Image (spheres, rainbow, N blue to C red):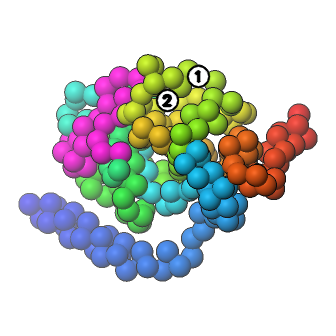
Amino acid sequence: MAETTHTTEQRQRQLRNVESSAEALDALRVSPGAHLAEEMATATKAGGDAVGLRERAFAVQLGLRATPGTASAQALESALGITLPKQIGEVTGDEAGLYALWLGPDEFLVVDVSRRQRPGETLIAEASLEGLPGQAVDLSANRTILELTGAKAREVLEKSVRTDLHSRVFGVGTAISTQLGPVPVIVHHSAELEYRVYPRASFADFTVRWLLDGMAEFLTSGGGAGFAGSASAEAESSD
């Protein structure tokens, strides 16, 4: 009993520390695509209803490891308030808020785009796994989320993604690990005219520029002039 009380008090202290540090953290951190925010906004304005691009900065991203149907998976589902996907490509939850992507038979990425990541995001999940096999890791800094929207969004992706994105096989609520050009990414069909691309943070600059190049033909006259060739030239120079 004393050990349980001590653990609870320790968790409460950790949560208080998290709350006090969150504001200071927001003042310091810079997203992987922040330096290209103006270019994305300019392209989005020029793209109108055809295409747009923005970064969903600092969204919560938790990496979970647990075998579906086990006590570990059930504990995580109960703690986080979400059902874990059970098959390749499946996305569960609310794609405007908290949802989970299938990455492997016992590997999942839980994302919350409705709020910003805070220190201690895994405390509740970790507590639920006490005495059980499994893992919960905060991966919010590992990837960023680039949101490509508009009537031509799929066409932009189809230039570079090595998979069939037709709605008959890649409908809303589907996500897969694939490649965008030379970059490993997760591509998530999050809404009818919306795709989320998850590159590693270190590839964010390249991925944004690559997508801007792909958008150029759909922008109003002159809107894409500053983007054309930027990522493709970089790719060629690295060959």
Asked if the stretch drawn in magenta spans residue 71, the answer is no
**Quarter of the rendering occupied by the N terminus:** bottom left
Q: Residue at x 57, y 76 (%)?
A: 28
Residue lying farthest to the left in this orientation? 1
For residue 18, which numbered disc appears in the image? none
Q: Which residue is mark 2?
A: 176
Give SS at disc 1: loop
Horizontal relation, residue 171 to residue 76: left or right: right
Horizontal relation, residue 202 to residue 176: left or right: right
Q: Is residue 185 visible?
A: no
Tell me where the magenta segment starts and ends, as one range: 75-95
Q: Residue at x 59, y 63 (%)?
A: 31
Distance Cα–Cα, label 1 vs label 2: 9 Å
Residue 13, given in percent of the width and then of the height, sits at: 28, 74
Task: Mark 1 or mark 2: name the one nearer the start of the chain.
Answer: 1
> CB atoms at circles 1 and 2 under 8 Å apart?
yes
Q: Residues within 10 Å of mark 2 (few under 14, many from 20)?
A: some
